[in-house]
Image (cartoon, rainbow, N blue to C red):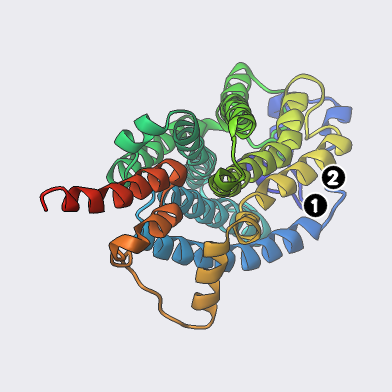
Amino acid sequence: IRSTKAMIDWPNVTASSYEELDLKPEELQRSKCVLGFIPVIYYSVLLCVGVPVNILTAVALCRLACRTKKPLYYYLLAVTGSDILSQLFIIFVGFLLETAVFHRDVPTVLLHVVSAAEFAANHASIWSTVPLTVDRYVALCHPLLHRQISYPARARKIIAGVLVLSLTSGVPFFWWSDVWRDSHHPSVLDAVLIWTHVTIIYFLPCSIFLVLNSLIIRKLRIRQRQQPCQEERGPPRRLGKTTAMLLALTSVFSVLWAPRTVVVIYHLYVSSVHQDWRVHLAYDLSNMLAMLNTAVNFFLYCFVSRPFRSVVRDIMLLRGGPLHPPRPLPQHQAPTNASNSSLYSGNNKRSQRDFTHLSPRRNRKPS
């Protein structure tokens, strides 16, 4: 995203453009980057840490997806892949190459093309979490429907659709203005693009997260109150781990992207980044926080998921794991296997226990 690049100390407009823009002397004073080279160091470290960590996350999620065939891991894999694209396009190409190395001395058309690619990657990174949230909501609140509609092939189709829509949504931002260099006040086109951006990137996905997460939490609380036996409290704990991972992902995104959304709207209506060094500073800091969101998911997965930690340990130790689900266990061990592989193992466990008790009687009746 063009607004994710911190400007170091070089002019925003050329001398010849002053006369064309008919700017007053006070308008020629550009806001300076108070942070200096700190953003360059920050984004370099974030890139050096974030890309290897996300690649490790992608490899671990691929193994888990091959083993379990759960749509959950396919959605998480899509989020990780989109984060890698965001780091490459926004941080590496957009900031380090264009701004810090070439000082934007590249063709204007190339700048706009990269800008559209940056927005597309960022939209994909955020909107890949939406199908995951919907899938968890259906799994908890409508389990029968979830068993019918949630499977890997459909998850891959949904992910492909999200990526295509994200790529399409980045095209209008070919005309995104450079808020650090453009000395004129935001135009009508700038206002339309800014509001479209904050709606796509923050307001709309956060509204979906808030509604669905609230319904999920409400459903879990009702289910806990309805649990009559201590024996049936095991499955909700497993559900709680998955739900905790989802809540952590959406909450971290909402917190890290909120400052940038506020600053973008403030830049549009109150004071521009070009004219006020305080807005410039707030913009730099908010963009640094927003980009941090592309590198923290690995630590959230490690903190919440034991299978993920186990697979990461195998990868770090160069140990290969089974790429296919294990073979079915004998009938007397089926209930245990069912409780480990199903989200709603309580019902499956009871049904299989009833079946094992009834089957011997059926065999004795003919004799």
In the rendered view, tell whether residue 206 sits above or below residue 359: above
Residue type at mark 2: give it: Lys
Distance (Cα) linking label 1 and label 2: 6 Å
Q: In this view of the protein, which residue sits in the foreground, 108 or 192?
A: 192
Above or below, comparing residue 316 to residue 142 in the picture: below
Which residue is the extreme one toward the top? 188
Find residue 94 and report its horizontal and vertical position in percent.
58, 52
Q: In the current view of this chain or complex, which residue is farthest to the front?
A: 367
Of mark 1 and mark 2, the one earlier in the sequence is 1
At horizontal 52% and vertical 68% (from top left) the residue drawn is 56
- Considering the numbered disc 1 on the image, is that residue within a helix, a strand or a loop? loop
The quadrant holding residue 281 is: top right
Q: Residue at x 54, y 78 (%)?
A: 316
Residue lying at 38% horizontally and 42% vertically, measured from the top left = 159
Residue 115: where, in percent of width, then height? 53, 42
Of 279 and 349, nearer the camera is 349
Residue hosting label 1: 9
Identify the residue position indicated by label 2 in the image: 32
> Taking 249 as reference, is 322 left or right?
left
Q: What SS does tag 2 mark?
A: loop
The residue lying furthest to the left in this view is 366
Left or right: 199 as drawn, with respect to 329: right
> Where residue 210 sits in the image (x, y, percent)?
63, 27
> Which residue is at the front of the view, 343 or 32?
343
